Amino acid sequence: MSDKAHASDQEHCARIFRQLLDALEHDTPFDLQLLYQLPYADFDLALNALREWRSQRYVWLLEHPVEGAWRSHAS
């Protein structure tokens, strides 16, 4: 029984991560409140994903100074 509850928790965390990464990739809104539902280690991982996304966005904007041209999935 405990394994099922744990698997359900893992599925819930995976769903939140998918939503976060999809939002970052497609430049769409994401409800940050969802991150508080994650265990601390996963919360920290999500913050690291946000830091990496922000770094990549910053570099992309330096290389492509056109206002409003940002798309995280652009090459």
Image (tube, helix red, strand yellow):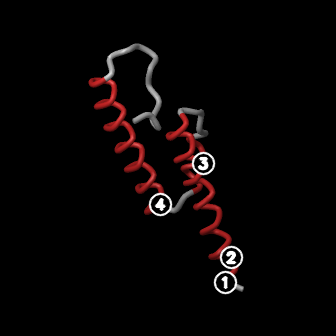
Q: Estimate how packed mark 4 is, as few (under 14), some (14 to 19) or many (20 or more) residues with alpha carbons within 10 Å.
A: some
Q: Which residue is mark 2?
A: 5
Residue 59 at x, y percent in the picture: 28, 31
User: Viewed as shown, does residue 22 lie left or right of 61?
Assistant: right
**Is mark 1 in CB contact (under 8 Å) with mark 2?**
yes
Give residue 19's mark.
Answer: 3
Residue at numbered disc 1: 2
Taking depth in this image into account, of 3 and 26 the one nearest to the observer is 26
Locate residue 14, reporting x and y percent: 58, 61
Q: Are marks 1 and 3 in contact (CB under 8 Å)?
A: no
6 to 61, vertically: above or below: below
Q: Amino acid under label 1? A: Ser
Residue located beneath label 4 in the image: 42
Separation of marks 2 and 3 at Cα, in angstroms: 21 Å
Which amino acid lies under the numbered mark 2 shown in the image of this protein? Ala
Nearer to us: label 2 or label 3: 3
| Disc 3, SS | helix
Of mark 3 and mark 4, the one earlier in the sequence is 3
Q: Horizontal placement of 37 versus 49: left or right? A: right
**Quarter assignment of residue 32:** top right
SS at mark 2 in the image: helix
Q: Earlier in the sequence, mark 4 or mark 2?
A: 2
Q: Residues at badges 1 and 4 in contact (C-beta under 8 Å)?
A: no
| Quadrant in the rendering for residue 37 | bottom right
Marks 2 and 3 in Cβ contact (< 8 Å): no
**Vertical arrangement, residue 70 with respect to residue 33, above or below:** above
Contact flag, marks 4 and 2 (Cβ < 8 Å)? no
